[in-house]
Image (tube, rainbow, N blue to C red):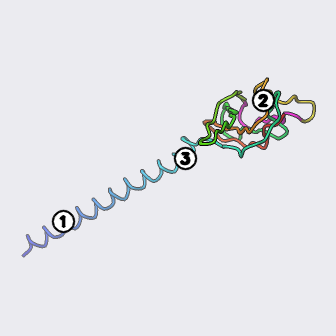
Amino acid sequence: MMMQQQVITDRMIRGSVMKRAFISVLLVIALLASFAPSVFAAFSYTSPVYNLSGGTIYFGNGVIVNTGTSYDTLTVKVYKKECTTTSCTNVLVGSKTISLSSQQYTYPGASGAPLIPIVTGTTAGQYFYTLSASGSWHVMASIHN
């Protein structure tokens, strides 16, 4: 009888230890996962379509802030929407990069800061832009001519 009680007690202890180990592993995984969004965060945005006249397309008239924790580069790509009677295609017409340190900002088009030219010699049409970066950004600027 004593031997049977000892076996049951040993099983209970082993089960309790295994449960604690499993919970510890889950907590470590949860902790690591909580850092994943900040490590793998990415900024991306696609604008609505703008009807622009021909000439130079600029990016600006709004604040651009690197809100991330390190130096980063924001890529601005401008596309022209070219449509036929059956389909539309998006043609890349120009791109520019903006590099800022953490918490640094620029305000192109205000306080004497020049607008950022993206592409020159365009024809009138429908244009949109995309923004992409590996970090976190706050962008209020847009395209115009």
Q: Nearer the viewer, residue 51 or 2?
A: 51
Q: CA distance from mark 3 to mark 2?
A: 41 Å
Residue at disc 1, secondary structure? helix
For mark 1, what is the residue? 11
In the image, taking residue 57 as reference, residue 129 lies left or right, namely left
Residue range of the region highlighted in magenta in the rendering: 100-109
Q: Residue at x 65, y 39 (%)?
A: 83
Name the mark nearer the viewer: 3 or 2.
2
Residue 131 occupies quadrant: top right
Q: CA distance from mark 1 to mark 3?
A: 40 Å
For mark 3, what is the residue? 37
Is residue 101 rendered magenta in the image?
yes
Q: Nearer the viewer, residue 110 or 41?
A: 110
Q: Are marks 2 and 1 in contact (CB under 8 Å)?
A: no
Task: Establish if 127 lies above or below 13.
Answer: above
Q: Residue at x 85, y 30 (%)?
A: 115
Q: CA distance from mark 2 to mark 1?
A: 79 Å
Q: Residue at x 33, y 57 (%)?
A: 22
Quarter of the figure with the N terminus: bottom left
The three-letter code of the residue at mark 2 reads Thr
For mark 2, what is the residue? 123
Name the mark nearer the viewer: 1 or 3.
3
On the image, the x and y values in percent for residue 84 come to 64, 38
